[in-house]
């Protein structure tokens, strides 16, 4: 029952990851960098300490109890994720929710599995036993699934009339979307590296009186510090370049509410990921793979519901279905191997 509840918690995180950008469709009159900054300020700066306040006693002392090297490493991984997050927004902007998140999540899960043992000098662990080989096969399956989904996107570009493409995804551009998806998928894996890299903070949280399910909340806060630095720097650069600081003078309760909703929904995917890990025992490291698989599944369903694949032929939809199925099966393999 604990493992089942853990999987459901990860799936809830996947739902948040698939839907957090939906409120952005209602933001009007603000430049891209304006609403993006409001979203990251709420999601990365405001929400984490608020969550920590209600879940971890004396959370600030708990976080600061970690060695400086751990804090810097987690923040650096957060900065790595920040680069991927910027590309993530552009990816959805150019490809839409269904196609964009399928490609981005597939790459993110693959890099999140392969890169850690390579950079730590344990590349041999990738093939050390049957479980490791199953994980490697799961990564290969996810990459094959990406090829099928990418092919579906290419066929979609050829089949759908320009006006239909613009109606579903106003700035649809397959070439730009694939490039930004590659950057998003590779760099966004930094989030998982950071979340799994501060067990000393988790132990301190439990010692301070936090419940097991909330022990990872201060880790999220530390990782997101680094992410906010990158996000804020990019937004400042875009404001200077496009002269869009005046957007903040045109305060809109509607826009502020929608952007705040984006931030709250976004951070919940990682809250669910860390909250579900204690329920999994030794299998806690499957959290990222399960969350990514859930994101792909839900984003595909939402993409279909939003008309992003309307007017495409049977071949295109078959490629999309095959790619999605193969990627989800790959993440199941990664989970089983782990």
Image: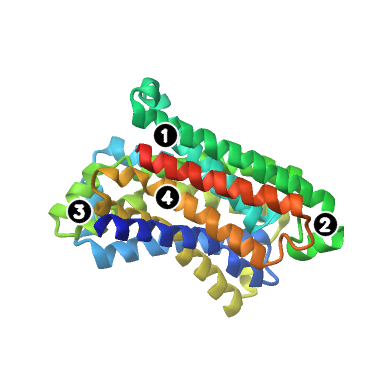
Task: Answer left or right for 78 relative to 164.
Answer: left
Instruction: Check residue 290 in the rendering and tell me which mark sits there, or answer none.
Output: 4
Instruction: Check residue 135 in the rendering and tell me which mark sits there, or answer none.
Output: 1
- Name the residue that disc number 2 marks: 160
> Label 4 vs label 2: CA separation?
32 Å
User: Sequence-wise, which precedes: disc 4 or disc 1?
Assistant: 1
Residue 158 pos. (x, y %): 83, 49
Which residue does the image show at 60% across and 64% down from the upper left?
A: 302
Residue 161 pos. (x, y %): 86, 58
User: Sequence-wise, which precedes: disc 1 or disc 3?
Assistant: 1
Cβ–Cβ under 8 Å for marks 4 and 2: no
Q: Nearer the viewer, residue 191 or 32?
A: 191
Cβ–Cβ under 8 Å for marks 1 and 2: no
Cβ–Cβ under 8 Å for marks 3 and 4: no
Q: Nearer the viewer, residue 201 or 243?
A: 201
Which residue does the image show at 45% across and 40% down from the upper left?
A: 190
> Label 1 vs label 2: CA separation?
37 Å
Which residue does the image show at 76% across and 45% down from the upper left?
A: 154
User: Sequence-wise, which precedes: disc 1 or disc 2?
Assistant: 1
Question: Mark 1 or mark 3: which is in front?
Answer: 1
- Name the residue that disc number 3 marks: 205
Q: Quadrant of the C terminus?
A: top left
Disc 4 crowd rating (10 Å Cα; few below 14, some 14-19, many 20+) is: many
Question: Mark 3 or mark 4: which is in front?
Answer: 4
At numbered mark 1, what does the secondary structure look like: helix, strand or loop? helix
Can you see residue 228? no
User: Sequence-wise, which precedes: disc 3 or disc 4?
Assistant: 3
Residue 24 pos. (x, y %): 61, 67
Which residue does the image show at 19% across and 59% down from the upper left?
A: 210
């Amino acid at each position: 029952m604990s493992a089942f509840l853990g999987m459901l918690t990860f799936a809830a995180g996947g739902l948040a990851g698939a839907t957090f950008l939906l409120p952005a469709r209602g933001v009007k009159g603000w430049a891209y960098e304006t609403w993006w900054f409001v979203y990251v300020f709420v999601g990365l700066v405001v929400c984490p300490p608020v969550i920590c306040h209600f879940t971890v006693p004396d959370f600030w002392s708990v976080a600061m109890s970690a060695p400086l090297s751990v804090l810097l490493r987690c923040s650096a991984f957060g900065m790595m994720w920040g680069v991927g997050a910027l590309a993530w927004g552009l990816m959805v902007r150019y490809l839409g929710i269904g196609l964009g998140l399928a490609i981005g999540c597939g790459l993110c899960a693959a890099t999140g599995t392969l890169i850690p043992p390579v950079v730590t000098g344990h590349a041999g662990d990738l093939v050390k036993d049957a479980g490791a080989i199953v994980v490697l096969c799961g990564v290969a399956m996810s990459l094959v699934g990406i090829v099928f989904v990418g092919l579906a996107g290419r066929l979609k570009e050829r089949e759908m009339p320009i006006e239909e493409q613009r109606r579903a995804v106003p700035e649809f551009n397959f070439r730009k979307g694939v490039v930004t998806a590659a950057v998003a998928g590779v760099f966004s894996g930094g989030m998982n590296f950071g979340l799994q890299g501060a067990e000393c903070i988790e132990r301190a949280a439990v010692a301070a009186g936090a419940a097991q399910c909330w022990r990872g909340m201060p880790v999220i806060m530390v990782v997101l510090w680094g992410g906010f630095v990158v996000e804020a720097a990019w937004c400042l650069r875009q404001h200077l370049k496009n002269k869009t600081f005046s957007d903040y003078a045109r305060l809109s309760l509607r826009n502020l509410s929608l952007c705040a909703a984006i931030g709250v929904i976004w951070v919940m995917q990682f809250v669910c990921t860390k909250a579900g890990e204690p329920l999994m025992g030794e299998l806690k490291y499957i959290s990222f793979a399960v969350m990514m698989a859930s994101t792909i599944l839900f984003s595909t369903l939402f993409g279909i519901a939003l008309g992003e694949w309307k007017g495409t032929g049977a071949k295109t939809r078959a490629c999309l279905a095959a790619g999605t199925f193969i990627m989800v099966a790959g993440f199941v393999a990664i989970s089983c191997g782990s």
